[in-house]
Image (cartoon, rainbow, N blue to C red):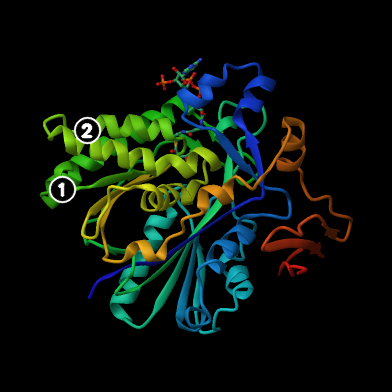
Amino acid sequence: MTIGIDKIGFATSNYVLKLKDLAEERGIDPDKLSKGLLLKELSIAPLTEDMVTLGAAAADSILTAEDRKKIDMVIVATESGIDQSKASAVFIHGLLDIQPFARSFEIKEACYGATAALDYAKLHIEKYPDSKVLVLASDIAKYGAHTPGEPTQGAGAIAMLLSRNPRILAFNDDNVAQTRDVMDFWRPNYSATPYVNGIYSTQQYLDSLKTTWAEYQKRQGLSLKDFAAFCFHLPYPKLALKGLNKIMDKSLPQAQQDQLKDNFEASILYSQKVGNIYTGSLFLGLLSLLENSDQLKAGDKIALFSYGSGAVAEIFSADLVPGYEEQLSQTRLEELNLRQPLSVADYEQLFFAEAQLDEAGNASFSGYENQTFALTEIAEHQRKYSKVEKSS
Ligand code: CAA
């Protein structure tokens, strides 16, 4: 029985910050962002759009009524959750109208969480072959204005529906993980933004890649020649490019090296316009590869490198299934171009706004007409979400 990704959905916010505008306002050379980080734009989310609404929107874009009857597990990976106790997966399960006899929970290890979720989902489907599992990776990456990480912020969610006989990718049983206790990036409970040892975090990322890849090759008896593409966690695309260069096997025929490089270029197109979406970044790279590469074919093996600060890394692979193209979108880049551009002043106001609660814990919000789902109010400290009715 093959198990893997049957459908993939993506959602991001309706606002965009152009990094040339940020560079001008901050007095930095725009080439530092476009060439030094390989980033162009960032999605910016207002208060009414959080990791719950983004996750629900990503899933809503792919689920049929039949899927909602079959799903018996909803796993949400996030590092920008909205409650220390109640899982965002429970809110999302309700918003999506998924049948009640399902297990819904949240999972956390920085940007790595969704990779663990996929493996758990696979084990679940092995045991219950008729089941479908919804795995969401949803985050708003907020470093703060004037911080080194500012140009690498972003907002978005990836939804993956897992099943047997998947129509996009079939997982191979080849995961190799590594854990190392380091403080490269973390967010204490009292802080809205993370603490980051920036350069150290990039060293940890690259060293985790090198050592996990060496172990993967040793255990699996595979090497780069066996892969058509390598997808990386994308905190910003330049770091992943350094990763590709680090593992590139110069003894491979030039055509195969070129294919790996071209597929890498296809895999960063969405992240260049969305920024970092933490847990979803690796899978946004995968989606970008599948929707933009003209060099892939059924049967190709794709490697994925997952990295979550703190740190856990994992490498695993999946094979492209015949007909995978039919499950993908042709219009994603055009849709990203429909986001409303913000001035730097408006971005600072919108992205860092916090709910102003009255003494009883109430606040109501407006301006969410263009969202799919919205945080509409907080009533006695309870977050209230709804699907936004569109006027025709
Ligand atoms: N033209 C072209 N390139 C230029 C340039 C110019 N005018 N000016 C600078 N650059 C280049 C630099 O040479 C550098 O390139 P190299 O890395 O190839 O040397 C690049 O632009 C970045 O410049 P700096 O080294 O000066 O670094 P920075 O101040 O931009 O900060 C950062 C980089 C520390 C990574 C910062 O973006 C940051 O703190 N980001 C958040 C943390 C992060 O993303 N870490 C990644 C690993 S952790 C992880 O993966 C989990 C996660 O999602 C957070």
In which quarter of the view is residue 43 placed? top right
Q: Secondary structure at mark 2?
A: loop
Q: Which residue is mark 1?
A: 226
Q: Nearer the viewer, residue 152 or 64?
A: 64
Alpha carbon separation for disc pair 2 and 1: 13 Å
Task: Between residue 27 and residue 205, name the one nearer to us.
Answer: 27
The single residue placed furthest to the right in the displayed view is 359
The x, y position of residue 175, in whole percent, is 25, 55
Q: Residues within 10 Å of mark 1 (few under 14, many from 20)?
A: few
Task: Judge whether 227 appears above or below 10 on screen.
Answer: above
Q: Residue at x 61, y 66 (%)?
A: 86
**Would you call the spot at circle 2 few (<14 residues within 10 Å), some (14-19), or many (20 or more)?**
some
Give the structural element (helix, strand or loop) at label 1: helix
Q: Circle 2 is placed at which residue position?
A: 248
Q: State left or right for residue 276 relative to residue 223.
A: right
- Amino acid bearing label 2: Met
Point out the tag, 2 or 1, that comes first from the N-terminus: 1
> Can you see residue 2?
yes
Can residue 140 be seen?
A: no
Quadrant the C terminus occupies: bottom right
Which three-letter amino acid code belongs to the residue tagged 1?
Answer: Asp
Q: Residue at x 52, y 46 (%)?
A: 277
